[in-house]
Amino acid sequence: MEVGRQKTLLAHIGEAVKLSAEEVERIGQLAKQLHDKAVLPVVGAGASHDCGVRLAKEIAGDLFEAYKEMLAPETVDPNIPREDLARIADAIYLKDGTQSRVVKELGIPDPTVWLPAEEMGPHFCVYSVLARMVRERILVDAFGFNYDCGAEAALCSEGIATGDVKPGQQWIDRARIVADPATNTDFVMNKGSFTLFKANGCAAKYRELAIRDEPRAAETIVVRTEQINSWKESGWSLNQFRSRAENHILLLIGFAAEDPKFSVELRQVLKGVYKAAPKAEGPRVVAIDRAKQALEIDGLIRDGLNGSPPADGVVTRIRTEGSTSTAALSLLLTEMLALALSDPLEREGATLPSEVDARLALLTVSAPAMRRWSYLVDSGSGSLIQRANQIARRGYVPLTHVPEVSARSIVARRAVRQRLGQPEIESAEEAARDHGFLVDRRYGVAYMPIGIDHDTLTATCRPGSELEMVRSTLSDMCPPRLGCILVSGDGSELRGVNLQTGKEVSDGQFD
C-alpha cells in the first residue's frame, strides 16, 4: 500500500480544477452522450492508484526479485522484462510447478500486503464515484481486473453493503462481488443489487477460499499467460462480459488495454455488433486515462466507431494528465446530475454555478449532505428496508430520488447563505467545512437546509424515538458545540427545527 496516494473528495475537487478548460468542456459533452444510455465501466489498474494500491508494473518489479531469488544468477532468463507481470509469473510457475507459489510471491495470501476492505483507510477514489453512480441508477454492473479490495472499501463508505443484506427497492444498496467461477454460477437473485465482476480474481476471495482448498483458490488469481489465453476461450467471466459489451457503452477507466484477453475479445464483440447493425450511431467505447499516447486504447475506440472517425463534437477520450481519474469521473457525474436535475431546478428558479470548484462543491459535497438529512428526517419518504439499510450504513442518498427535494434544498441553501451575509457561490472548501452545515458563530448556531415541508419536519423532529433515531444516526455529522437547526422548505420562508431540542425556530430567529 502507498497511503500517500489516497486523497479526500476535497483533494480530488482540487485536482479537477487543474483539468484544462478543453477537457472540462469535453467532460460536459460526454455527460450528454452518456445520459440515459446503458454504461458499463471497465476498470483497470490505474483506477486503484487513488486507493493507494501499487500498480502492476511496481508489483512486477517485486515479483521479478522473487524470481531471481529462486534461481542461481547464471540461470535467470535475461529476456524476461522486469515489468511484464505475466511473463515473470510464467517463469516462477515453470520453476516451482505450482500456481500456489506464484500467488504466494504476489503476496495475495498476506492481508498486510493486500489489505481487506475494512483496513484500506478512509479515502475517495474512482470506485467511490462509481458507487454514487450506482445509487443514481446510472450503473448496474462493472468489470474490473484488479485483485485489491479498493472497490469494496469504496462501496461500503458510500453505504453499499457487500454481505448478506436484503436490498431496498428505491435505490441500490447492496453489491454482489463475483471473483471466482463458483460465485458466478450461484443461483442468486440479483434484483436490487449492483454486480462487480473481478475478472482476474480477488485477494480477499482467495483468502476465503484458501481455508478450504488453497490450490483451487490459487487458480482464481489470473496472472500467467496460459490463464490469460484460456479466458479468451472459456473464462468464467467471458460470457458475462460479452453479453454486456453487446448492448452497453464501455467506459474504460485507468485501463491501458495492454491485457490481450480484453482487447481481443472486445474487438470480436464489436465485430458482431456491427455485423448486426452496421451503422455506427455513436461511440461504443470511451476512455478516461492519463496517457498522452495509448495506441491500443485508440484502436479500441476506433473499433467502437466501426472504423469511422468520430463526428464533430463527439467525445471518445478524456485525458487526465496532471489531474486524477477520480477528479475527471467526479466531474462527469456532476454533469450527469446537472442534466438529470435540470427540470426541477428550472421549476424552482435555480441555476447551477459554472465554475468547476463551485459546481462540484454543490453537487458532490453540499447537496449530498442535505439530501442525507432530508431522507432520514422524512419518515414517509422510503420503504422500511431502504430506511433501515440507510440508518445502518448511512452513505450517499441519490439526488435523483425525489429530485424536487434536492432542488428545493439547493434553493434554500442559497437563501440561508444570503441571510447570513455569505456569497451566493460556495467553494468546495466551504461546503466541506462543518459537515455541510452553514454556521453563524455569532449566535452559536448551524443551519442545514433539507428541502422538505415544515409539517413533515416537525412531525419527525418532535421529542421522541424518531428524533432520537435521526440524532443518533448522524450525531457525528453535526458541528460540535453549536445549536444545529434543520431548515425546511425552499427558503422563501425560513423556518426550522432545533435538532437537539426538537423545538421550532421561527423566521425572525435567523437574523
Image (cartoon, rainbow, N blue to C red):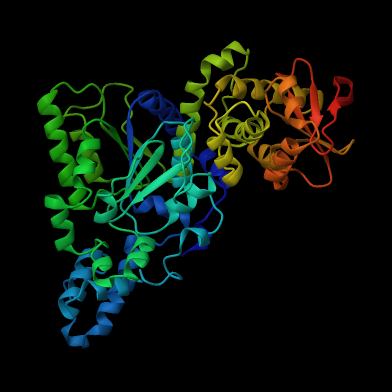
418 or 127: nearer the eye?
Answer: 127
Residue 127 image offset from top left, x and y in percent: 44, 46
Q: Considering only vertical position in the picture, is 366 above or below 151?
A: above
161 or 299: nearer the eye?
Answer: 161
Q: Give the tally of numbered discs.
A: 0
Which of the 4 quarters of the picture holds residue 33? top left
Left or right: 245 in relation to 356:
left
Residue 270 image offset from top left, x and y in percent: 16, 34
Q: Residue at x 77, y 28 (%)?
A: 422
In the rendered image, is residue 322 in sight? no
Residue 200 image offset from top left, x and y in percent: 27, 56
In the rendered image, is residue 215 in sight? yes
Q: Residue at x 33, y 33 (%)?
A: 39
Left or right: 384 in relation to 474:
left
Residue 2 image offset from top left, x and y in percent: 48, 63
Which of the 4 quarters of the picture holds residue 450? top right
374 or 105: nearer the eye?
Answer: 374
Q: Considering only vertical position in the picture, is 250 above or below 506?
A: below
Left or right: 350 in relation to 340:
right
Q: Considering only vertical position in the picture, is 373 above or below 83?
A: above
Q: Considering only vertical position in the picture, is 430 above or below 229?
A: above
Left or right: 446 in relation to 426:
right
Q: The C terminus is located in which quarter? A: top right
Q: Residue at x 20, y 29 (%)?
A: 305
Which of the 4 quarters of the picture holds residue 466? top right
